Image (cartoon, rainbow, N blue to C red):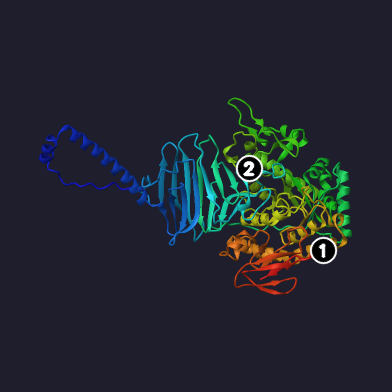
Amino acid sequence: AMPLSRHTGQIPESTWTLSFREMTEPWKGALGCLGVAVFFAMTIGIISWQALEQPPEQWVLRGRDAGMLWERGRGALLLRALPAGRPVLAIAVGSVPATEPPPPRDRCWHDGGQFCYSWEEDAELRLSLEPPAAPGTECYGVRWTPLRPDVTLKDCFSMANVSWYGGPSVRAQRWPLNGAESPARPLVSGDLSANPDGFGPVLERYFLGSTGVTVTVAPDVSLLLSLESHRQFCLETLAGQAQPLHYQLCVSADHLVRDFPPCRSPIWRYHGPEGSAAKIKRGLRSLVRRLKRHRLQEGVVALGERGTAVLAAADLVPSGRRRRQAPVLVEPLELSITLSPYAGVTSPLFLRSLRGGEAAGYWLSRQPRPGGSSIPLLTTWKGQLCARLNVTSEAALGWYLARARRLQQALGATYVAFEGVEGNSFLEQDVPAPAKLAGDGYTEVLAAALATLGNGTVISAGTRSSHLPLFVQMSPLRSDWSHAGLKGLIPSVLHYSLLGYNFFIPDAVGGSVAGATPGDPELFVRWLQIVTFLPVMTFGTPPWLCCDAWVLNLTRQCIQRHRDFVVPLLLKYSEEWQSLGYPIFRPAWWLSPTDPLAFTIEDEFLIGDEVLVAPITEKGQTWRDIYLPGEGHLWLDTNTARVFDGGTTLRNYSASLAEVPVFVK
């Protein structure tokens, strides 16, 4: 507030002094009381004037297309688009006195591109205009710095009138993210099978709001994320660590991606005997014979980690005959093997590595005390006590990658899948991590190394790795109709694709985690109808084991439709993905960005701009409401050849158990 101006005219001193001397004592006392009263009245008036005159919102930093304001009443940062001042984002600020007004005490007043303010002994805020992330964007850096070790910084992003997408994958995936609920947890990828309440294997520190704003969190900041359903999501620093909170806000930023890794489809998971190499060989050949018998002899047979380890230990084929004999395992199909960065402490792999001179550096270790030796950081993987590969060691990575190449060649495998890429072993055990492995550093470093193995590589997690030519394996889903099962499939597809992971491998048809309705033929069929339009079709339970003959015939039709119709579409839109960064699988709001209804639709998806898939995800239903996006467009129903206007909703649209509604623009 500006100080009040004072009257500078002089009062005749002699007159004032003479009159005061002539007063009696009672009058002097009365005058003194009157003066005190006037003083308090003026003070209250000034305070009231300030409260009335000062606006509830005050600009703190303006750009060309947007600007940041401070809202006094609730202590919030606001982002508004210019020139109309359209609300874009509201950030409730925690851990600083919300009632204390910030500026005009701008400590960066000399720099028009920054605004700085300090809450004494609490925290310092620095806002800055930053170089645009892409043409046509405007970006603001937000950096909080604690001024005491016990200060915890927390910013909450409102969901009021904003639909949010991106961030972490969760067990019961929602689209948008507004419907998800989670207490504060480390923003680190994890294994949902081992920790269903945590975050999933695909995680980016990137959030997209329906108002055209993106929030990108700095990768070197360790923090917690909480999701409060339909209210807000919050970023919070770890207690007692005096760490900064740093993120960037951009208006109309794009998330760029690269490269298309090819993969044959479908994938048939092997669930046969694994007691010995001989039993695995017989089981694989038995599966291939059955696939041939049912005219499904194409795609990939996927061998799990245990089966891969048994074959590796058996040293199946002599070195001189490996290339000729190994592929016989699953011909005419191709083979996928599975590895992980873990080694059991009693396994031959771990014991052999200890014999090498650099053995101590091959596995993650606790930081040694001065003068002490490093101790492997032991953790649990699939129920066994294990050591985990040290990805910061070039020698360890080189040894691990060379082993993967040798095994791939020896077994004649076309693809290698890597499980256990997600998670932070140090954080799980509350042990300080090396700087390179803080947060999701392990996943990022290992993914970059695995990408050197070629396009036949599948990983179980992704963070800051969407530019790599890798397939990402989706988390297992429950065999039921819930959001942890079938209903969560399409939200997961949209989530992965929006973050740049367009080439993913969905969970097996029908789900692979025991649910409320195992072996449900209807669930199998509705699941099959969705994965037909995804990059890869995966089967755990073969259709001849779960269902009637007509479902087996439908499976053949879906595989052919995927090969003839879907794959060419994916190839076409992968070029657009590479050149423009647009996701291949798109939500309804992609074509209807001004329709509020489109932002909450989670049971439909687009392939590019030209194909809309609207499957049934409710048990027992043979009809559904279908939203056709894109006002002014026409949509052709591929089942009936009927044509409908875009920007409309088809009520109670029929879809028998053998049909999936698909529309072409």
Q: Position of residue 102 (x, y in %)?
A: 40, 45
Q: CA distance from mark 1 to mark 2?
A: 42 Å
Question: Please, which residue is most extreme toward the bottom here?
Answer: 642
Judging from the image, what secondary structure is the residue with disc 2 in? helix
Assess disc 2: are there few (<14), some (14-19) or many (≥20) residues with their C-alpha within 10 Å of its C-alpha.
many
Q: Residue at x 87, y 61 (%)?
A: 549
| Relative to 503, 121 lies left or right | left
Tell me the tag on residue 65. none
Report which quarter residue 333 is drawn in.
Answer: bottom right
| Relative vertical location of residue 505 with respect to residue 312 in this rendering, above or below | below
> Where does label 1 land, which residue?
554
Residue type (three-letter) at the residue carrying disc 1: Leu
Q: Position of residue 296 (x, y in %)?
A: 84, 60
- Between 8 and 408, the one lying in front of the other is 8
| Relative to 473, 522 lies left or right | right
Residue type (three-letter) at the residue carrying disc 2: Tyr
Whether tag 1 and tag 2 are in contact, CB under 8 A, the answer is: no
Judging from the image, what secondary structure is the residue with disc 1 in? helix
Residue 299, visible in the rendered structure: no
Q: Residue at x 41, y 49 (%)?
A: 114
Q: Residue at x 73, y 37 (%)?
A: 343
Report which quarter residue 162 is drawn in.
Answer: bottom right
Q: Position of residue 3 (x, y in %)?
A: 29, 46
Q: Nearer the viewer, mark 1 or mark 2?
A: 1
Residue 45, visible in the rendered structure: yes
Tell me the tag on residue 442. 2
- Between 636 and 447, the one lying in front of the other is 636
Q: Position of residue 56 (x, y in %)?
A: 41, 51
